[in-house]
Amino acid sequence: MPLYTYRVQTESGKVLTGETKIDSAEKLQKLLLDRGFTPIEIKEKNFINDISQISLFKPKIKIKDIAVFCRQFAIVLEAGVPIATALDVLVEQTANPTLKDCLRDIYENIQKGTSLSAAMQQQKDTFPTILIYMVEAGEISGQLDRVFKKAADDFEKSYKLNHKIKNAFTYPVIVTVVAIIVVMVLLTFVIPTFESVLKGMGVELPLPTRILIAVSNVVKSLWWIISVGLVGVSLFLVRYLRTQNGKRFIGGLAIKLPVVKGVTKDIMTSRFTRTLATLMSSGVLLIQALEVVEKVLGNAVIADKVRDVQEEVKKGKGLTQPLTNLNYFPPMLMSMVKIGEESGELDFALNKCADFYDQEVETSLQRMTELISPAVIMVLAVIVGFILLSVLFPMFSVYQNIE
């Protein structure tokens, strides 16, 4: 459905602007006239006059945007505002244009009689699966405002967790990239100049220096082939890692690498407990909740294991025994799940467990950063040291010859 922007004049002479999705400009003009406005300008938005209409340039909807939307929606619903009116208000308040378009589509579908969960299901590429299930359960229970408030709390916690994970890897990545750039500049521009100076002096070059000069010559003469090769390998890896086999490969590494596996276990436990608790407290059945958990874990290997747990739960074995047989999650989770099932408050027990492992993730990330950063610096020190020694050895020889 096309998107139109418009400028209208009220009876008092005030000029208003807005935008909406509608079948045609003629229908929009008629709608505005029926509402007592005098249309001044109606213009369709497209990729020619608005670059944001090209999907490549549309801003992505981040988990923070979803958290803000849920928080605002919960506040408006708690005030007793009808769903359609609440969405109309949120469309105007939403800053992200991509999310604004999605909310506008949902508003129009609700005006046609579609339920909120069904309208959000049509935007499943935009909204997380967990939110759609929660909204559906909230509609059935009549507690939609409470569901959105709960969703806002959990998305905010997820955003903070993801932010901590990104921050943990930022410093090592920046140091590595800067070091690679410096080494490439040395090999491409500095070492060739140094080579010509040494050849003019007629000094016999030691083995490390000859190796460095050989590497420099290869980089300097074949830089375009190396660049194309790196780009090609990067594109191949990106494409491969998006496949199911690629996701399983990365997931397997994450649970086996010595430093990373502990952090991965804490992250998986936090996501598993938080998602399951959120869905169950919203009224979603355990089997359906496990189906959602499988999709949001972010590790294909653990997701496969959770799928096995679903099959066991369908056979009526409860949750404690299948999770224990999984032999992955920590014993504390098993104990909390058992207590929760026996007391009939599984969602409460899982929530407490999620809070605990959120703190564990922070501790694990800090510990991993403390290990990775020195390791990266040591590797870079070895590389830079080799370059320096390869340059200094011939200089010592020149100095001795002069003496």
Image (cartoon, rainbow, N blue to C red):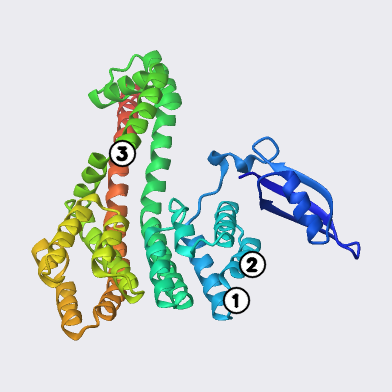
Estimate the spatial distance between the alpha carbons at disc 3 and disc 2, rounded to whole Å: 62 Å
Q: Position of residue 240 (x, y in %)?
A: 29, 35
List the residue tagged with mark 1: 81
Give the mark, 1 or 3, whose residue is nearer the N terminus.
1
Give the mark, 1 or 2, whose residue is nearer the N terminus.
1
Do the numbered discs 1 and 2 sit on residues whose CB atoms are within 8 Å? yes
- The residue at the point 54 percent across, 80 percent down is 78
List the residue tagged with mark 2: 89
- Mark 2 secondary-structure assignment: helix
Q: Position of residue 15 (x, y in %)?
A: 85, 58
Estimate the spatial distance between the alpha carbons at disc 1 and disc 3, rounded to whole Å: 67 Å
List the residue tagged with mark 3: 385
Q: Residue furthest bottom?
A: 343
Of badges 1 and 2, nearer the viewer stands 1
Q: Amino acid at mark 2?
A: Val
**Up-down relation of residue 245 to residue 278 (above or below):** above
- Mark 1 secondary-structure assignment: loop
Q: Amino acid at mark 3?
A: Gly
* 215 left or right, relative to 108: left
Q: Position of residue 272 (x, y in %)?
A: 27, 65
